[in-house]
Image: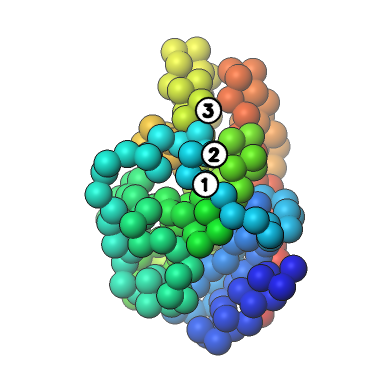
Amino acid sequence: MKDQKQSRNLLRNWGPAGVVVGFSFALVIGSTTLGATASPNVSVPEKSFAASEYDFDLLASNEPAVALPEVIAAQLEPGAYKLETVRLLDQSDSGSTYSALDEQGQLCVITYVSGAEWTAGIGCSSPSEFNESGANIRISGPEGTSEVYLLSDQAAQKLSSRSAKRSASALPLEQTSSNLVTLDPSVSADERVKISESLSDSGVKLEIMPQEISDEIE
């Protein structure tokens, strides 16, 4: 758990912020005190992973890498993620979402809520975790909240099928790109159970986060 402790100490050096252990780890950075959550605890891995281990073809594409917003990149340690692996997944007036590999080869989903009091969250997972149930991160800050789910190619294909689309259309989910789904963080616990069950019935295994935002560091 040494890496986890180092992440927490580094974040405190940046200023008031929240951090939580997610698949392998998740952290939040920003201009003010923040809150974040990710999926249940998994220890920081001691091995490195290859991009080919992930069911995520974007990692092997020839699409050029993009740069993270300067306010995020400036807060991360050199080498915290591989510059050449950053890909833009979704962008709007309120923020953006990216994928990248960290130095251990974990697949990270990075979401950013823009504004004067911006917030950004980074959640990473190993190949087995991602291929089984995707990666996710939810952040909350003065400018708003964001809850995003990065799907494996297999899960994304199933969600795009006609039957799954009909099922998902009645749910508070938005598929903003082929592998990315967003959910309103205010959705109730009961509704989250219904979402999980409906997706499972369509053959899409996606770990929907609990309603509460917890594990915030003061």
Q: Position of residue 194 (x, y in %)?
A: 66, 29
- Label 1 and label 3: CA atoms lie apart by 20 Å
Q: Nearer the viewer, residue 103 or 77?
A: 103
In the image, residue 112 lies at what x, y percent?
Answer: 41, 61
* Other-residue count near label 3 (Cα within 10 Å), few / some / many at <14 / 14–19 / ≥20: many
Could you tell which of marks 3 and 2 lies nearer the N-terminus? 2
Residue at point 65% right, 46% down? Answer: 209
Q: Dot 2 surroundings within 10 Å: few (below 14), some, or many (20 or more)? A: few
Q: Secondary structure at mark 3?
A: helix
Which quadrant of the figure contains the N terminus? bottom right
Amino acid bearing label 1: Ala
Q: Is residue 31 left or right of residue 16?
A: left
* Earlier residue among tags 1 and 3: 1
Q: Looking at the picture, which amino acid does disc 2 mark?
A: Glu
**Residue at (52, 46) in percent of width and height:** 50
Report the residue marked by disc 1. 50
User: Does residue 135 appear left or right of residue 42 in this picture?
Assistant: left
Q: Nearer the viewer, mark 1 or mark 3?
A: 1
Q: Are marks 2 and 1 in contact (CB under 8 Å)?
A: yes
Tell me, for residue 136, which label it has, or none.
none
- Above or below residue 2? Residue 179 is above
Does residue 54 lie above or below 17 as drawn? Answer: above
Disc 3: which residue: 155
Few, some or many residues within 10 Å of mark 1 (<14, 14–19, 20+): few
Q: How is the image coloured?
A: rainbow
Task: Identify residue for label 2.
Answer: 53
- Distance of mark 2 from mark 1, alpha carbons? 6 Å
